[in-house]
Amino acid sequence: MPFHIHIPDAEQAYLDGLPLSPEAKERVNRFVEGVIANISDQFRLDPANRADPSKPYFRIRQVIVDIWGDGSEHSIDFHVRDDKVAFGVLLIVFIDHNG
């Protein structure tokens, strides 16, 4: 069963304002709903995906080439808090875009 993904208003506004074409933004939304919402415990708990294994955060990156817009490669890092995973909830606390 997928996790419920919560994105605070400020992070959602950041996502909405990314310099991506509408199609690329839709693919980012699908990544959140399809990949992050269905993240495996193996990925989530892998120390390589955690800046500090003692803290309840993991990072996952999406890389997309916006062929519908500027044609450039964009990487989007999602920093996700997972201390409510037992309740089926993941919280995207920070999003960083490079591209």
Image: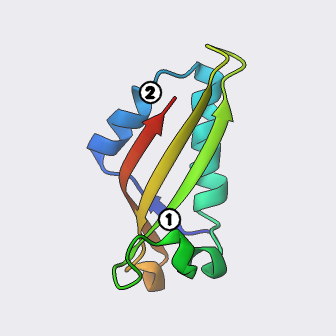
Q: Position of residue 39 (x, y in %)?
A: 62, 68
Query: Under tag 1, what secondary structure?
Result: strand
Residue position for label 2: 18
Compared to residue 45, the image places residue 67 above or below, namely: above
**Residue at horizontal 40%, vertical 47%?**
95
Measured in 3D between alpha carbons, the distance from the residue under mark 1 to the one under mark 2, in whole angstroms, is 23 Å
State which tag comes first along the sequence, 1 or 2: 1
Residue position for label 1: 4
**Residue at horizontal 54%, vertical 22%?**
20
Compared to residue 90, the image places residue 41 above or below, namely: below
Q: Nearer the viewer, mark 1 or mark 2?
A: 2
Query: Under tag 2, what secondary structure?
Result: loop
**Residue at horizontal 33%, vertical 34%?**
13
**Displayed quadrant of residue 43:** bottom right
**Displayed quadrant of residue 10:** top left
**Displayed quadrant of residue 45:** bottom right
Q: Amino acid at mark 1?
A: His
